[in-house]
Amino acid sequence: MGWDLALAQGAVTVRFLTADIVKLSYVPKGGTAASPTVVIDPDAAFPALTLPPVEQQGDEQWLGSDKAHLRWQARGDQLIVEDAAQRPLLRIDVAALARGELVARHDKGDALYGIHGYGAFERADGGLRRKGRQVAKAGEQGFAGAPFVWSTAGYGVLVDAEGARFTLAGDRVSVQGKAQPIRDVYLFIGPPRSLFASLAQVSGRTPLFPKWAMGFTNSQWSIDEKELLEIVDTYRAKQIPLDNMTLDFDWKAWGEDDYGEFRWNPVKFPDGPDGKLKALLDAKGVHITGIMKPRVHLDTVEGRYATEHGFWSAASQPSPDYFSHKAVRDVDFDHPQARTWFFNDALKHSFDTGVIGWWNDEADYLGSDTQFMNMQRALYEGQRAYADQRVWSVNRNFYLGAQRYAYGLWSGDIQTGFASMKGQRQRMLSAINVGAMQWGMDGGGFKKGRTKSGAPTPENYARWIQFGAFTPIFRVHGDFDQKRQPWRYGPVAEKAAADAIRLRYALIPYIYAYEYQRRQTGVGLVRPLLFDYPDDPTLREDVDAWMFGDYLLVSPVVERGQTSKDIYLPAGSWTDYATGKVYAGGQTIRYAIDSKTWSDIPLFIRDGAIIPMQVPMNYVGERPLRDVDVEVFPAAARHVFSYYDDDGATYGYERGDYFLQTLAAQRQGDSVNFETEAATGSFRPALAYYVVKIHGTAANAISDAGHAWNQVADLDALRASVGEGWAKGSDRFGPVTWLKVAAGQPRNITLSERR
């Protein structure tokens, strides 16, 4: 429902697509509607929406939902966008669309975000806010872009145009297209989380990564089968968790004829082509990701085929490859037939024999917003047509729309050292601010920084691993012949790094739940603090800390030799994960840092937290997960957590094959209520019980719908007991009551401290 507004040169339609999404479309007289760009999900669907009738008084009309209101002022061609409380947010100059541009006015103090991130070698001191002239593009080396600008004041603007030029000045946003006029504009209304939910609805949701991708990835350039197995065996012997080894040029027959770009190197990996290496690694719980390049050698069977079928990018010319020194040229991935050909029989054989993840490199040099996106699209669509095994990838730039293709972004060939590591915070959070929720980096740094060896110092390595453990994609990588295994940096760094990796694995049930959340809500595992606290002006440029899921705030150490750190905690109550000390929010605290053993990660638990955890494993799924520990820090307000699981490997979840159960907790005076709803979905995990730890409560009575529960002596006795029950005691957080609760079943449990 909306308006059809006649202008001298054409007409603008104004439509509510949902209660908080409004679409503006301009069609010139005698013309047709613009075709959507890659930014818009071709499968986006919007159910029919019923709104109250349009109201009119004089030249002004009103139309609204329960989340947003529009006012049309015909006299000035102004469309006023308001929130649910009818607070004006934007004034759109509708006539400007006839000129092919968007012009919108807002309150001068509004903080604006989005549009772009930062390249690997670009200074990131511009922070998170956006001002002045900005360009939405895919860019190079870790860059992320989207024709999307949004504000913590409660609105977002998505223009459907590639290469959009934004000018943000004072109280005015104007946008022009590089190659085409602006015709279609989407307006989102609400807090940051709602804006990104709307963005996902319009631009496309993310498929789930495989569960193993929640773990740790060791990438290496210069490796063979013998060293690969030695590295894996050392991880296992030291019980340092590992799920993925990512291989550079070494894995493939690069430069050889007969599809060498797509098949195993039989010299370096003699057991690769026949699947024996895959069987060995499967037994050890390790997956293989292989590098992919956008170029193909010309004087080969595959090169001649590409020439005959017109698969080359016009922006690419034949040139000598820096690694093979033979002539190569880039494939045009915007060409649908080229994409289909790229997932060819040779690559299918590599996939069948163990290369099940894609590290897409160097498709960012042609000045195209779509080359990298469509390279991964070729692999995504090819793999999905061939197998039900989930797709996983990392890529070196991002343009909105890429998230539809199981697309991860990494920040490029960054340097080693503390300065480079510190700058990754801006790169990560600004990329997330344009919708690149699946982000990672070359932990340890890729290129030589200030160290002559090209390797990070032991301290830098330890701190980098701790940082990486709290990013969406957790991986390490280095330049040619550089090694990034924890034991190569000395025993102190090894212990600090191994502890951080083990903590990551303990959090896998919590982390994996945010795969589901990201797909459902558009908001991922990591988000800037301003997502959750949009009204706190202190956080407008804060990159020093971020939310890791809904209930953890992390502020990694990024300074060499630091002995203390000032950390701002937002409103609320925060518990130090390491010590149990409780801090009041809304203030900056001085936090002591261990500068000798680098053993600490500043990590804080939000009041109301519900955090499922597991005993760390050497790899994801090493053992059936029969019990999950759920750390609960009940607050006066009711808090919920959606516990999620599925087979972790296939797309069965799209067909309802998942396990989803809502857990909730609330403190009311001297009692705490813990609830579980009946699970939904057809998947049946090994999970039998939640061991729920209600912190801050030493209960004297437990009831479930009026029936008393059996009390046992302590936590060990509770774990060993048959059926549901409870115990009480204490831990580093203070008094605690433990509940053993049957998973999948509805429960309404009251813990009372009264005798």
Image (cartoon, grey):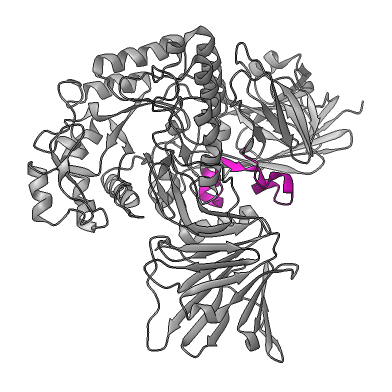
Q: Quadrant of the C terminus?
A: top right
Residue 303 sits inside the magenta stretch: no
Residue at the far top in the pictured view = 491
For image coordinates 67% across by 30% down, the residue present is: 741
Residue 533 sits inside the magenta stretch: yes
**Against 308, is 599 above or below?**
above
Which residues make up the magenta segment? 516-543
* Near-viewer residue (135 or 649): 135
Regarding residue 645, the answer to whether it shows in the image is yes
Q: Return the x and y of residue 531 as percentages of the image width and height.
A: 64, 48
Q: Quadrant of the N terminus?
A: bottom right
Query: Horizontally, is 557 left or right of 262 in the view?
Result: right
For image coordinates 25% across by 14% down, the residue present is: 226
Question: Which quarter of the picture shows residue 77?
Answer: bottom right
Q: Return the x and y of residue 545 as percentages of the image width and height.
A: 64, 35
* Near-viewer residue (40 or 673): 40
Q: Return the x and y of residue 734 as percentages of the image width and height.
A: 80, 20
Q: Return the x and y of residue 610 as percentages of the image width and height.
A: 68, 35
Question: Which quarter of the picture shows residue 592?
Answer: top right
